[in-house]
Amino acid sequence: MPSYTVTVATGSQWFAGTDDYIYLSLVGSTGCSEKHLLDKPFYNDFERGAVDSYDVTVDEELGEIQLVKIEKRKYWLHDDWYLKYITLKTPYGDYIEFPCYRWITGEGEIILRDGRAKLARDDQIHILKQHRRKELETRQKLYRWMEWNPGFPLSIDAKCHKDLPRDIQFDSEKGVDFVLNYSKAMENLFINRFMHMFQSSWSDFADFEKIFVKISNTISERVMNHWQEDLMFGYQFLNGCNPVLIQQCMKLPEKLPVTTEMVECSLERQLTLQQEVEQGNIFIVDFELLDGIDANKTDPCTLQFLAAPICLLYKNLDNKMVPIAIQLNQVPGDENPIFLPSDAKYDWLLAKIWVRSSDFHVHQTITHLLRTHLVSEVFGIAMYRQLPAVHPIFKLLVAHVRFTIAINTKAREQLICECGLFDKARGMDSTEHIPNYFYRDDGLLVWEAIKKFTAEVVDIYYESDQVVEEDQELQDFVKDVYVYGMRGNKASGFPKSIKTREKLSEYLTVVIFTASAQHAAVNFGQYDWCSWIPNAPPTMRAPPPTAKGVVTIEQIVETLPDRGRSCWHLGAVWALSQFQENELFLGMYPEEHFIEKPVKEAMARFRKDLDTIVSVIAERNKNKKLPYYYLSPDRIPNSVAV
C-alpha cells in the first residue's frame, strides 16, 4: 500500500502549539484517503516551534496530490494552533510543499493547495476551481468593509482587536496595548511624577528638560539645543518626520500678501521676491487643510486652539532652507499679521511654534494615520477579500500587510478620539536645485528597488498585458481598493482597473512602498523630532497672536502644553518610535509563501539591492551632525505594525 511521509511545522510564536487531535486527509487526482490521526505514542505532538513527521499509509493509489485537508478536534479545552506548513514526501520520492501560515481555531479545518502560485486561468481542474471560489466566499464573510468616520477610507468591520479574524490578530495583545506601552514609556522616561499635572504650566523653556531624556549625540538632543534657529526649522520640512508638505512656490498666493520690502533682509541674491520665485528659490508650506477645524475637546478643563498657517521658505546661498514669512491664518487682515525674521524675537519664535504645532497635527492625522495606516489597511482588506492564497499577488503582498489591520483596530479602540491621497509633483524633484533632501533621495532609491522586484515577479506570472487585464481576481482586488477603500474618489489617484504589466508593477510598488518605506519615514523619527515639546507642541492653550510686539516668553510658555499633556505626548512619541519585537525588515520573507526558484532568486536580488542602499546611506551619513537614516532598508519594517 502507498505510504507518504507527512512533515508538519508548528509556529514558534506564543501559544502556537496545540494538544488537540489533528487529522489529515489527502485528495488526489484519482482518489481520496481516509482521515488519519497524526499522533506518535508517548510524544507531545505539535509543540510550539516543533517540526514533526508522520508516516501515512493509504489503501489505494491517489494519483497527483491536489489538496491536503487538516482537521482539528477538541482534546480537552479549545486550543488554537498555528500551522506554518506541511511537506509531503510521496511514494515516488517527490516532495510537495503546502504553505499555510494560518491559525486553526476551535473545531476547525483548513484545506491547503501546494505552494506553486497560480492565476485563475491556470486552474483547469474542477476541484481546484471550487477550492479557490470557496476560499474567497469564506473570506468575504470574515473581512467586511465598515465606515469608521465619514470621509475616511473604509476600514475593517470590527469594534475591537478580539473581533478580528484570528489570522490577522497580533500574536500577543500585550505587545500592542497602547495604554500598557504608554505606561512602559513613562517608566522608561522617568516622567511618572508629572503625569497628572494637567493645567500646570512649565515655568520656562529650560523647565521642559525635566521630562527630556538627554541622550548624547542624538538628533533629539540636537533639536533641543537648536530648535529656535531658523536653519533647524527649515531643515525639518525636508528631513524631519513630515517631509512631504513642502512645495516649490510657483506663484505667490493672493491670500499671503507678502512684499519684497518685508523680506528683503532674508533674500541673499539681490533679487526681488518675484524674481526669487521665478528662479525657484521660494518654497511654501500651506496648512489650509486645518482651516475651520475645531480643536479637540477631549480635555474639558483645557481650551485648545488650532491655526491654519502659511509659511514661506527661502533656499539661501548655502542651499539651506530658512523661513522668511509666516501668516498664522488663511485670510489676510489687520488681525492676521505676517510675521517676519526681522520682528521681535518672541513674535517670530511663537509664529514658528504655531507652524510646528500645525505640522504635528497634519503629520499625525494625514501623513501618518491616513496616508500610511489607513491606506495600507485598505490594501490588506481588499487582498483578503479578493485574492486567494494561491494567487501570486497575495503571496507577494501578505508580508506587507502583516498586523496592519490589527494595529489600526487597536488604535481606533484605544487611541484615536471620536470627533486625493498621493502627492502630485510638488516641484521638489531636482537633486541639483534642491540638494540635501534626503527623504526624496533615499525614498527614490528604495522605490526603484521595490519597482524592480515587483516587475520581476509580475513578469514571472503574467506573460503579457492581456493576462493582466483578464485576471478577474486581480481586477476585483483593484476595484475593491478603489470603490470601498478610496470611496470611488478619482482624486485619490488610484485606478479602477489595471491593464498592463507595467501599471501592475507600479501599483504593487505603491502598496509595498506605502506599507514599508513611507510609514518608516514618517513614523520612526517621531521621538527624534517631537520629544522636545516646544519643537512639536501637540496642543496650544491660547489662540494665535493677532498683533506684533506683544508676545512675551511667559505668554509662549502659557500657550505650550501643560506638564501632564507634555508627558502623555512624550510617552506617545517614544512608544510609536519603537520597533516591534522580532521586527521583519524590508526584504525579509521568513514565511515561504512562494516556493518557485525564479521568485526566490528575485527575492535574493531584491535583498542585495537593499543592502547596497544601506551602504550608500551609511556612507552619506558619515560625520553628519544630523544623519538621515529613516529610509535605510535595515530600518524599514515590512509592514505598518506600530
Image (tube, grey):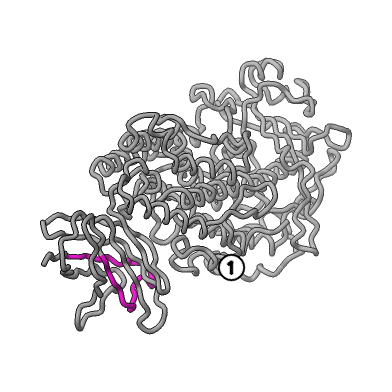
What residue is disc 1 on?
179
| Residue closest to the eye, 128 or 242 | 128
Report whether residue 278 is seen.
yes
Residue 441 shown left or right of residue 156 in the figure: left
| Residue closest to the eye, 117 or 520 | 117
Q: Is residue 13 magenta?
A: yes
Furthest residue in direction right, as rendered: 334
Q: Name the amino acid type tagged 1.
A: Val
Q: Is the residue 573 above or below the residue 397 in the image? A: below
Q: Position of residue 350 (x, y in %)?
A: 74, 44
Residue 113 shown left or right of residue 205 in the figure: left
Location of residue 63 (image quadrant): bottom left
Q: Is residue 454 magenta?
A: no
Q: Is the residue 427 above or below the residue 546 in the image? A: above
Location of residue 371 (image quadrant): top right
Q: Is the residue 81 above or below the residue 594 in the image? A: below
| Residue closest to the eye, 493 or 574 | 493
Q: Position of residue 253 (x, y in %)?
A: 75, 25
Disc 1 residue crowd, few under 14, some 14–19, many 20+, Cα 10 Å: few
> At 87% from the left edge and 37% from the top edge, which residue is drawn?
335
Residue stretch rendered in magenta on the structure:
5-25
Q: Is the residue 277 above or below the residue 628 in the image? A: above
Q: Please state, as top left, top right, bottom left or bottom right, where the N terminus lies in the image.
A: bottom left
> At 65% from the left edge and 16% from the top edge, which residue is drawn?
278
Q: Position of residue 104 (x, y in %)?
A: 39, 68
Secondary structure type for disc 1: helix
Report whether residue 181 is seen.
no
Residue 173 shown left or right of residue 485 in the figure: left
